[in-house]
Image (tube, helix red, strand yellow):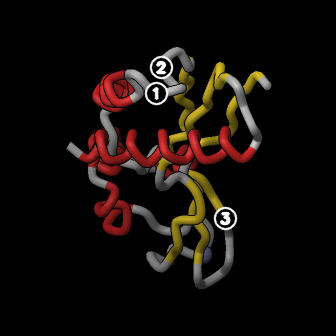
Amino acid sequence: MHEWALAEGVISTILTVAKKKDAKEITEAEIKIGCLQQIDENIFTTAFRELVKHTPLEKTKIKLKNEEAYFKCRTCELEWNLTNTTNALGREESEAIHFIPELAHTFIRCPRCGSPDFAVTRGRGIWVEHIKILK
Ligand SMILES: [Zn+2]
């Protein structure tokens, strides 16, 4: 259940930032999830709500937002995103990429030079984008 571990990490990040800023209350937290991050948002939300019981985050609203994936070709340096790529793929393949990011390298090619050698520059991981606090 890695959603629980992710939720724990997010919570400790929020608490650290809130403490640094001397927050009396944390009203809202916006959390970004890269679209290549494998996560069940429902489980994540449940884990979050469960883990913040009896903490200063008990009443904090959370907003989950997705970040699109971006790739950078190591051969010609072109940067592109998953939307462009999946348009060129069949539906079945793009679904597979969404659920199994490791497959990305099997299917995705640079749209300009056709190279399979690229780096994922955005769209991975989960992080706290910003928090709203009361002082
Ligand atoms: Zn290229």
How many numbered circles are shown? 3
Q: CA distance from mark 1 to mark 2?
A: 6 Å
Q: Which residue is mark 1?
A: 55
* Circle 3 residues within 10 Å: few <14, some 14–19, many ≥20: some
**Image marks 1 and 2: residues in contact by CB distance under 8 Å:** yes
Classify mark 3 as within 8 Å of ligand 1 or not, answering yes or no: no
The C terminus is located in which quarter? top right
Q: Which mark is residue 58?
A: 2
For marks 1 and 3, the one nearer the N-term is 1
Labels 2 and 3: the sequence-earlier one: 2
Tell me where residue 104 sits by quadrant.
bottom left
Q: Which residue is mark 3?
A: 79
Residue flagged by tag 1: what amino acid is it?
Thr
Using the image, tell me which numbered label, if any, was put on residue 41. Answer: none
Judged left or right of residue 100, residue 121 is right
Question: Residue 39 at what x, y percent from top left?
Answer: 33, 40
SS at circle 3:
strand
The type of residue carrying mark 2 is Glu
> Hey, what amino acid is under mark 3?
Glu
* Point 38% across, 46% down: residue: 6
User: Disc 1 vs disc 3: which is toward the camera?
Assistant: 1
Residue at 59% x, 42% y is: 128
Image coordinates of residue 68 in percent, x first then y, are 57, 45
Residue found farthest to the left: 1
Q: Residue at x 26, y 47 (%)?
A: 2
Horizontal relation, residue 76 to residue 68: left or right: right
Considering the image in quadrants, where does the N terminus appear? top left
Alpha-carbon distance for marks 2 and 3?
Answer: 40 Å
